[in-house]
Image (cartoon, rainbow, N blue to C red):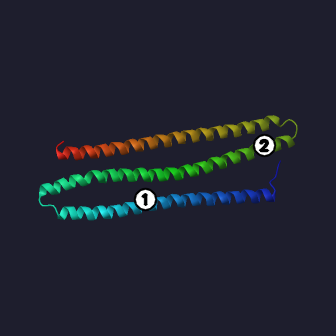
Amino acid sequence: MTTLTTEQMLAAQKANVETLFGLTRKAFEGLEKLVELNMQLAKAAMVDAADSAQAVMSAKDAQELLALQQKMLQPTAEKATAYGRQAYEIASAAGAEVTKVAEAQMADLHKAMLSMMESAAQNAPAGSESAAALVKSAMNAAQNAFEGVQKASKHAATFAQTHMHTMAETASRAAQQSTTDRRGG
C-alpha cells in the first residue's frame, strides 16, 4: 500500500490552510458588501424620513396628507424589493464562491484517490484485481453522485433566483397598482 510522505502531508496541510483562508476572505468580502448595503439603506432611510417629516409638517389638510402617504408607499415597497434582491445576489455570489472551491477540492480529492488506487493496484498481490476494480467503481459512483447533487443544487439555485426576481416584480407591480387604486385609478 502507498504511504504518504512527510512532504506530501505538509503540502496537503498547506493547501488546506490556504483554502480555509481563501474561503474566510470570501466570507468577509460578502459580509462587507452586506454591511455596505445596509449602511446605504440606513442613510437613504434617514434622508427619506427627514423628507417625509418635512412634507407631512407642510401639509395643509387631511387630503394632502393622504396623498403624501400614498406617494410614499410605492417607493418604500420598491426599495424593500430592491434591497432583498441585492442581499440575495450578495449571498448567492458568496455561495457560488464556496461551491467553486468545494468542487475543486472534491475533484482534487477524487484524482488523488484514483491515483492512490492505481498505485495500490499495481503493487497489489495477484488475484486482487477484482477488489481493486470494485473500489474504483465505487469511487466513480460516488463521484457521479456528487456531480448529480451539484447539478441539482445549481438547478435549485437557478429556480430560487428566478422565483426571487418574479416575486420582486410582482411586489413592485402590486405596490404600483395599490398606489393607482388609492388615487382612484
> Mark 2 Cα within 10 Å, few/some/many (few <14, many 20+)?
many
Q: Quadrant of the C terminus?
A: top left
Between 109 and 123, the one nearer to me in the picture? 109
Q: Residue at x 20, y 55 (%)?
A: 68
Amino acid type of the residue tagged 1 in the rendering: Leu
Amino acid type of the residue tagged 2 in the rendering: Met
Mark 1 element type: helix
Instruction: Find residue 74 and report its horizontal and vertical position in percent.
Output: 27, 50
Q: Is residue 163 left or right of residue 149?
A: left
Between 55 and 95, the one nearer to me in the picture? 55
Instruction: Find residue 105 and report its horizontal and vertical position in percent.
Output: 66, 49
161 to 87, vertically: above or below = above
18 to 132, vertically: above or below = below
Between 2 and 21, the one nearer to me in the picture? 21
Mark 2 element type: helix
Which numbered marker is on residue 117?
Answer: 2
Displayed quadrant of residue 38: bottom left
Q: Is residue 172 left or right of residue 111?
A: left
Q: Residue at x 37, y 60 (%)?
A: 41
Q: Are marks 2 and 1 in contact (CB under 8 Å)?
A: no
> Mark 1 Cα within 10 Å, few/some/many (few <14, many 20+)?
some
Which numbered marker is on residue 37?
Answer: 1
Which numbered marker is on residue 121?
Answer: none
In space, the residues marked 2 and 1 are separated at their CA atoms by 49 Å
Q: What is the total number of numbered labels drawn onto the structure image?
A: 2
Q: Is residue 61 left or right of residue 22?
A: left
Instruction: Find residue 52 and report its horizontal and vertical position in percent.
Output: 24, 61
Q: Is residue 2 left or right of residue 99?
A: right
Instruction: Find residue 54 and report its horizontal and vertical position in percent.
Output: 22, 64
Q: Residue at x 51, y 57 (%)?
A: 30
**What residue occupies the far left of the structure in this picture?**
61
Query: Which of pointers 2 and 1 lies earlier in the amino acid sequence?
Result: 1
